[in-house]
Image (cartoon, grey):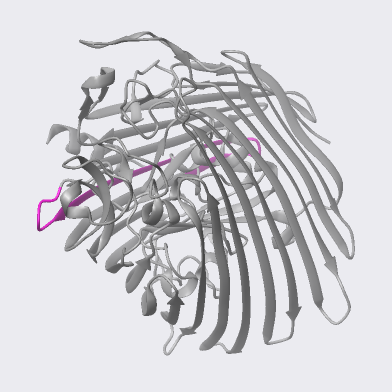
Amino acid sequence: MKTVIAILALVVLPTSLWSQLSEEIDTIVVSANQLPSTTRETGRNITIIRPEQIRQMAATSIDEILQFVPGVEVQSRNGFGAQADILMRGSTFAQVLVLVDGMRLNDPLTAHFNGNIPIVNEEIARIEVLRGPAAAMYGPDAVGGLINIVTKTFADKNDEGLNLVGEIGAGSNGQVLGKASLSLRGENLTGNLGFQYNKSKGELIPQLVTDNTTLDPYRNYFDIRTLGGSMAIRLKNNVRLKFRSTYDFRDFSARYFYSGSTVDKSTETTIGSFNVIQLEKLRENSSSDLQIGYKYNTDEFTFSPDFSSTNFHKTHLLNILTNHLWDLNDQFVLKVGGQLDRRSIFSNDRGDHQDMHAGVYATALLKPVENLNITTSLRADYDENYDFEVLPQLNISYLFDAVVLRGSVGRSIRAADYTERYVSNNLAMLTPGRSLGNPALLAESSWSEEMGIDVRVNNKWQLKTTGFLRQSSQLIDYVLTNEAEIGPIGDLQTGADYFFAKNISSVKTMGFEIESIFRQRFGVDNSVSLVTGYTHQKTSNEDGIVSVYIANHAKDLLTISSMIEVDRFRFSIGGLYKNRNARLAQSINSQLESDYWLWNLKVSVDLVEKMSLNVQVQNLFNKDYQNILGAPRPHRWFSGPIGWRL
């Protein structure tokens, strides 16, 4: 109880890094809402992260940025974006939809790759975090929330002229890091070329000793490279043509990422590309667009070099999206659209499979009376895996001068990915305890409700609170199951137990969020800003089934982000507290503690007008902790890049 009281006290203190208050917070148009709505009009709890905030944060990768957003839980397995699961509102890692410029990024193979966002930080115009369901607008997977990365080229936010920004530096454990972005904005042509690189031999993980086995030390190395380019061309008659192509490479130690076996010496390499072409036609009171996206990914996973254990996977995702919007008058905006996608996999472990998916939807913004905003959406969705589903959504907000009352209700679904359906199905004689896919899995189904209030205390301070509830059925997770109950799936040992993918019924998640946002400016070059957020959430199932991922989220989550700017100096600090269920893996002598604090620090100074020196410290107080049982996070880590803006 003392811990909860202390957390609440921190949250309600005047405290923002994420939002500019006053007029700016009201006039941000949120792309993730599909309709041209400000944050106050959406009826949802939304956070907007801006480019200047991304540059100033004590974070390197997008998942490190997201871990300090109130209500977002990031379960990283290694440092600096090698691999991370994203959870929201007590969801599983597979129940958050990730978009880039409105195009689906979620990986068909496994949601463990959803955090592999192939965008260079300097090309981001904003990150939109929408909490709660959005499946009626975007289709499956948007159960706990949605993250939309909006890039400068597609949002027409590049700086005028030719600009070169970047940084290069070194850090602990042989780390070399750098990034650069070259952007151009002319009268009819906008473009960007970006590169990001982060490599380290990794921290030496000490020798682990159990009762029966001595395990050799190892290094949790990583090598992450992203290269991307985008272009927007303004044609005649208000037509815009936009392109994007991105290459992403990740090679890292994956030891104990997915198992607690004493023979686990896993390494993993993923290589992917993400490509989008968009044609957009703007009219006085309407607009139309056609987008075609193609994602290709390869995954090479080696469980141990001591014996034959390498799995190869290739996945393809072709996504076609078209929309038409009518801004009919001040009281009514309507948008209709359709989506068609094809996903496929070629794998020595999971086999070769392909599926088609289609959806049509309509969403409307109504303002029947002054200050009342009603957004309603309806989607009809078809998939070869789960057949036909209907997804409704209703959001309402009422605006007073300094108060917003909001609420929403909606249905969302999630289909099983290829790992949940087919993992290990193609392998010979599976050893007990292995994960096993289930081709007969049904789609998850959830109804979500929320109510919230936003209060602007003054033009510097805002408070937000939200209560949420989600009732889910047929949730997918791995449950220890005897071979006799599994049936003719895989090559199993008689009488052995396996972690078999199942639909678990009657799961309920409930909780509340509190945020406090504050910003104070002193003159032109001096400011203090801070945001605090606290989320309490609980998940339970009526049958009391013990599974791997359901209820694997934090019970209490506190985030603190602060920045001080004084003349040429900038100080940024991020704090994170998690309270969750403790777990123990005796086989590898590893423990997931019930709670921990994490602090990151960044100090920057402008050396000259266009150049700065940055000193960043991850895990400032050298905490020994894990997000995933068996995968220790890096200890205190220094890096010192020099940045430039020309």
Write the residue at 44% across / 36% down: 561
Q: Is residue 462 visible?
A: no
What type of secondary structure mainly makes up the magenta span? strand
Asked if residue 464 lies left or right of residue 302, the reply is left
Asked if residue 501 lies left or right of residue 119, the reply is left
Q: Is residue 540 visible?
A: yes
Asked if residue 196 lies left or right of residue 73, the reply is right
Q: Is residue 495 above or below residue 629?
A: below
Q: How many marks?
A: 0
Tell me, yes or no, whether the highlighted magenta stretch contains residue 39. no
Q: Is residue 578 above or below residue 162?
A: above
- The spot of residue 185 in percent (x, y) is 85, 55
Write the residue at 10% across / 51% down: 544
Quarter-wise, where is residue 378 in the image?
bottom left
Q: Could you say which is closer to the camera, residue 273 or residue 42?
A: 273
Tell me, yes or no, whether the highlighted magenta stretch contains residue 528. yes
- The spot of residue 219 in percent (x, y) is 49, 16
Q: Split into 4 quadrants, where in the image is the C terminus? A: top right
Region rendered in magenta: 519-545
